[in-house]
Image: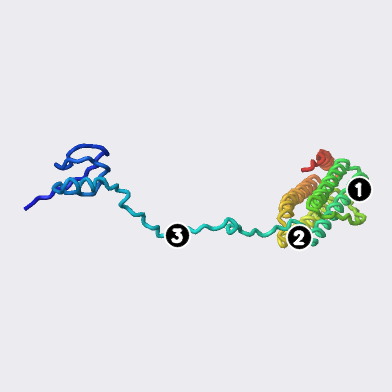
Amino acid sequence: MRLRSTCEEIVPVGSNRLLNGVEGTAKGFIPPGRRFDSGRETGDLEERVRSPYRENIRPKKPWYSVQRIPPSNFHVPIPAIDSSMKEKIVDAVNRQIQAEFQSAYHYLAMSARFEELNLKGAAQWMRTQWQEETVHAMKFFDFLVRRGGSPRLMVLSAPETEFNTAAEAFEETLEHERRVTALIHSLYDLAVEEKDYSLQTLLHWFIDEQVEEEEAAEEIIQSLKLAGESGEGLLLIDRELGQRTTPEEN
């Protein structure tokens, strides 16, 4: 029985050495994992050695196919965004401007009434409130201008201020601020309904501001109830009210 042996070896090009007992000049590489018989003729072995390994491998076709798509086909249409204000929003903001100026007019009249009652501190507080409401109106005014809307100034009615005590005046102030809060909330609901996100952002500031306005009026009412309507306690509260500073436009 003739025994056959195998080997796995890489033969450098130009090497003269025995390959399992067979002498020959290697013209290429014997790839790993390939076998050759040591008992075969040298010519056959040299022929097999000369055959480049990579030339005997045909590239397999990929299981997938590549299709070139023109760049224009990658375009995804983006819906146009209409940043213009709807007429319904413009009208509502103009009404809010009128309401804010009306509030300012109202507080200025209350300041005059406190001057008549010789409560200088409360008169200063109401004058500052008049300035603050004017700032609020101008915020809406400037908002319309920036958005391309048309601010329309409406007629203001004469304010009625017939209070005789500080407590009555601030009770009236609290009720007035609650009405303004309702207007702000109604305007916010409209902004949500019409998907006016810029107006919603602006109204977030006003919603927080109205919480502070009502809170301030309630605190003054409680202080006046504790102090009474005359005497030293009222004078101390009046002095404290007069320390309110002019609001800064944010």
Residue 1 located left or right of residue 204: left
| Chain-order first, disc 2 or disc 1 | 1
Mark number, residue 52: none
**Local secondary structure at mark 3:** loop
Type of amino acid at the residue the image marks with label 2: Ser
Q: Is residue 212 above or below residue 17?
A: below
Where's residue 233, x and y in %?
81, 41
* Residue, far left: 1
Instruction: Give the image quarter of residue 157.
Output: bottom right
Q: Read off the residue under disc 2.
A: 186
232 vs 104, nearest the viewer: 104
Where's residue 205, x and y in %?
73, 49
Residue located 26% across and 39% down the image: 12
Q: State how far apart marks 3 and 1 are (Cα).
A: 88 Å
Mark number, residue 65: 3
Marks 2/1 in contact by CB < 8 Å: the verdict is no
Of circles 2 and 1, the one toward us is: 2
Q: Read off the residue under disc 1.
A: 113
Q: Residues within 10 Å of mark 1 (few under 14, many from 20)?
A: many
| Chain-order first, disc 2 or disc 3 | 3
Type of amino acid at the residue the image marks with label 3: Ser
Q: State how far apart marks 2 and 3 are (Cα).
A: 60 Å
Instruction: Give the image quarter of residue 199.
Output: bottom right
105 vs 230, nearest the viewer: 105
Of circles 3 and 1, the one toward us is: 3
Where's residue 61, x and y in %?
39, 58
**Local secondary structure at mark 2:** helix
